[in-house]
Image (tube, helix red, strand yellow):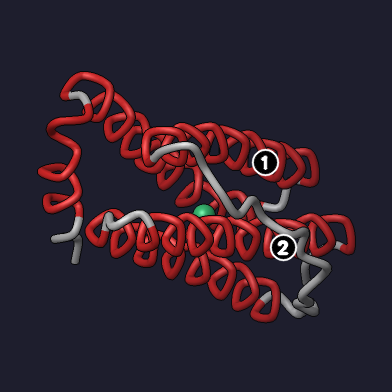
Amino acid sequence: MISQTLQDALNGQIVAEIYSANLYLSMAFYMEKEGFDGFSHWMKKQSSEEMDHAYAIANYIIKRGGTAVVGNIDAVKQNWESPLNAFKDAYEHECKVSKMIDDLLDKAIAEGDKASQDFLWQFVREQVEEEATASSIVDRIERMGDNAIFNLDQQYGARQ
Ligand code: MG
Protein backbone atom coordinates (compact mmCIF):
# COMPACT_ATOMS: atom_id res chain seq x y z
CA MET A 1 0.00 0.00 0.00
CA ILE A 2 1.30 3.40 -0.95
CA SER A 3 1.43 6.18 1.69
CA GLN A 4 -0.93 9.13 1.51
CA THR A 5 2.05 11.48 1.10
CA LEU A 6 3.43 9.62 -1.90
CA GLN A 7 -0.02 9.12 -3.38
CA ASP A 8 -0.64 12.89 -3.21
CA ALA A 9 2.79 13.64 -4.68
CA LEU A 10 2.25 11.17 -7.54
CA ASN A 11 -1.20 12.63 -8.21
CA GLY A 12 0.55 16.01 -8.40
CA GLN A 13 2.85 14.53 -11.02
CA ILE A 14 -0.19 13.35 -13.03
CA VAL A 15 -1.29 17.02 -13.15
CA ALA A 16 2.22 18.00 -14.29
CA GLU A 17 2.25 15.36 -17.04
CA ILE A 18 -1.16 16.45 -18.37
CA TYR A 19 0.03 20.06 -18.22
CA SER A 20 3.07 18.99 -20.29
CA ALA A 21 0.80 17.21 -22.78
CA ASN A 22 -1.33 20.38 -23.12
CA LEU A 23 1.76 22.57 -23.48
CA TYR A 24 3.11 20.44 -26.34
CA LEU A 25 -0.31 20.30 -27.99
CA SER A 26 -0.46 24.09 -27.80
CA MET A 27 3.01 24.23 -29.40
CA ALA A 28 1.80 21.77 -32.08
CA PHE A 29 -1.10 24.06 -32.97
CA TYR A 30 1.23 27.07 -33.06
CA MET A 31 3.70 25.25 -35.36
CA GLU A 32 0.90 24.13 -37.67
CA LYS A 33 -0.44 27.67 -37.94
CA GLU A 34 3.04 28.94 -38.83
CA GLY A 35 3.42 26.30 -41.56
CA PHE A 36 5.81 23.99 -39.71
CA ASP A 37 3.91 20.74 -40.20
CA GLY A 38 6.91 18.59 -39.23
CA PHE A 39 7.46 20.32 -35.89
CA SER A 40 3.71 20.18 -35.34
CA HIS A 41 3.74 16.42 -35.88
CA TRP A 42 6.73 16.08 -33.53
CA MET A 43 4.95 18.10 -30.83
CA LYS A 44 1.78 16.00 -31.13
CA LYS A 45 3.86 12.85 -30.59
CA GLN A 46 5.52 14.54 -27.61
CA SER A 47 2.12 15.48 -26.22
CA SER A 48 0.84 11.93 -26.51
CA GLU A 49 3.98 10.61 -24.74
CA GLU A 50 3.25 12.94 -21.84
CA MET A 51 -0.28 11.53 -21.58
CA ASP A 52 1.29 8.04 -21.51
CA HIS A 53 3.35 9.18 -18.50
CA ALA A 54 0.15 10.32 -16.75
CA TYR A 55 -1.50 6.94 -17.48
CA ALA A 56 1.55 5.05 -16.21
CA ILE A 57 1.60 6.99 -12.92
CA ALA A 58 -2.16 6.49 -12.42
CA ASN A 59 -1.76 2.77 -13.14
CA TYR A 60 1.06 2.55 -10.59
CA ILE A 61 -0.90 4.36 -7.85
CA ILE A 62 -3.88 2.04 -8.38
CA LYS A 63 -1.72 -1.10 -8.39
CA ARG A 64 -0.31 -0.01 -5.01
CA GLY A 65 -3.81 0.25 -3.56
CA GLY A 66 -4.12 4.00 -3.89
CA THR A 67 -6.49 6.32 -5.70
CA ALA A 68 -5.45 8.18 -8.84
CA VAL A 69 -7.13 11.51 -9.46
CA VAL A 70 -6.99 14.26 -12.06
CA GLY A 71 -6.48 17.62 -10.38
CA ASN A 72 -6.82 21.11 -11.82
CA ILE A 73 -4.65 21.71 -14.84
CA ASP A 74 -3.42 25.29 -15.36
CA ALA A 75 -3.90 26.92 -18.76
CA VAL A 76 -0.82 26.66 -20.99
CA LYS A 77 0.91 29.30 -23.12
CA GLN A 78 -0.69 29.72 -26.54
CA ASN A 79 1.73 31.71 -28.66
CA TRP A 80 5.46 31.95 -29.34
CA GLU A 81 7.74 34.29 -31.28
CA SER A 82 9.31 31.52 -33.32
CA PRO A 83 9.78 27.73 -33.40
CA LEU A 84 13.16 28.32 -31.72
CA ASN A 85 11.41 30.10 -28.89
CA ALA A 86 8.94 27.26 -28.45
CA PHE A 87 11.72 24.65 -28.32
CA LYS A 88 13.61 26.80 -25.78
CA ASP A 89 10.45 26.80 -23.64
CA ALA A 90 10.17 23.02 -24.12
CA TYR A 91 13.75 22.57 -22.89
CA GLU A 92 13.20 24.77 -19.84
CA HIS A 93 9.96 22.95 -19.11
CA GLU A 94 11.68 19.55 -19.23
CA CYS A 95 14.34 20.80 -16.77
CA LYS A 96 11.51 21.73 -14.37
CA VAL A 97 9.91 18.30 -14.80
CA SER A 98 13.27 16.63 -14.06
CA LYS A 99 13.44 18.54 -10.78
CA MET A 100 9.90 17.40 -9.92
CA ILE A 101 10.81 13.77 -10.58
CA ASP A 102 13.94 14.13 -8.43
CA ASP A 103 11.83 15.53 -5.58
CA LEU A 104 9.39 12.63 -5.92
CA LEU A 105 12.22 10.13 -5.76
CA ASP A 106 13.59 11.90 -2.65
CA LYS A 107 10.17 11.41 -0.99
CA ALA A 108 10.14 7.71 -1.91
CA ILE A 109 13.67 7.33 -0.52
CA ALA A 110 12.74 9.17 2.70
CA GLU A 111 9.88 6.71 3.20
CA GLY A 112 11.96 3.68 2.31
CA ASP A 113 9.35 2.82 -0.36
CA LYS A 114 11.49 0.67 -2.66
CA ALA A 115 8.72 -0.07 -5.19
CA SER A 116 8.12 3.65 -5.73
CA GLN A 117 11.84 4.28 -6.02
CA ASP A 118 12.08 1.56 -8.66
CA PHE A 119 9.05 2.98 -10.48
CA LEU A 120 10.49 6.52 -10.45
CA TRP A 121 13.98 5.65 -11.71
CA GLN A 122 12.56 5.01 -15.19
CA PHE A 123 11.28 8.61 -15.14
CA VAL A 124 14.70 9.86 -14.06
CA ARG A 125 16.19 8.08 -17.09
CA GLU A 126 13.40 9.36 -19.33
CA GLN A 127 14.12 12.95 -18.28
CA VAL A 128 17.76 12.61 -19.32
CA GLU A 129 16.49 11.82 -22.82
CA GLU A 130 13.83 14.56 -22.77
CA GLU A 131 16.30 17.27 -21.78
CA ALA A 132 18.89 16.08 -24.30
CA THR A 133 16.36 15.91 -27.15
CA ALA A 134 14.91 19.39 -26.55
CA SER A 135 18.35 20.89 -26.07
CA SER A 136 19.68 19.33 -29.29
CA ILE A 137 16.78 20.75 -31.31
CA VAL A 138 17.47 24.22 -29.86
CA ASP A 139 21.18 23.81 -30.76
CA ARG A 140 20.40 22.70 -34.30
CA ILE A 141 18.03 25.56 -35.01
CA GLU A 142 20.51 28.06 -33.56
CA ARG A 143 23.48 26.65 -35.50
CA MET A 144 21.74 26.13 -38.82
CA GLY A 145 19.79 29.39 -38.76
CA ASP A 146 16.51 30.40 -40.35
CA ASN A 147 17.43 29.18 -43.84
CA ALA A 148 17.67 25.60 -42.69
CA ILE A 149 14.60 25.59 -40.49
CA PHE A 150 12.36 24.03 -43.13
CA ASN A 151 14.85 21.17 -43.54
CA LEU A 152 14.73 20.59 -39.79
CA ASP A 153 10.94 20.81 -39.92
CA GLN A 154 10.90 18.02 -42.51
CA GLN A 155 13.39 15.97 -40.51
CA TYR A 156 11.40 16.13 -37.27
CA GLY A 157 8.21 15.44 -39.17
CA ALA A 158 9.50 11.88 -39.62
CA ARG A 159 9.21 11.09 -35.89
CA GLN A 160 7.51 7.72 -35.41
MG1 MG B 1 6.74 13.48 -19.01
Coordinates of residue 52 in the picture (x, y in percent): 48, 71
Which numbered mark, 2 or 1, is in the foreground of this view?
2
Amino acid type of disc 1? Met
Of 14 and 87, which appears nearest the observer?
87
Left or right for 31, reference 147: right
Q: Residues within 10 Å of mark 1 (few under 14, many from 20)?
A: some
At x 13%, y 33%, the residue is: 148
Q: Secondary structure at mark 2?
A: helix
- Residue 15 numbered mark, or none: 2
Q: CA distance from mark 2 to mark 1?
A: 12 Å
Of 58 and 29, which appears nearest the observer?
29
Amino acid type of disc 2? Val
Please give the residue where the numbered disc 1 appears in the rendered image. 100
Coordinates of residue 155 in the picture (x, y in percent): 12, 50
Where on the picture, by quarter, is residue 43?
A: bottom left
Whichever of callouts 2 and 1 sits on the residue coming sooner in the sequence is 2
At x 19%, y 49%, the residue is: 153
Q: Residues within 10 Å of mark 2 (few under 14, many from 20)?
A: some
- Residue 1 numbered mark, or none: none
Q: Is residue 63 above or below residue 125?
A: below
Coordinates of residue 65 in the picture (x, y in percent): 75, 80
Q: Secondary structure at mark 1?
A: helix
Of 145 and 125, which appears nearest the observer?
145
Image quarter where the C terminus lies is: bottom left
Q: Is residue 48 above or below residue 130?
A: below
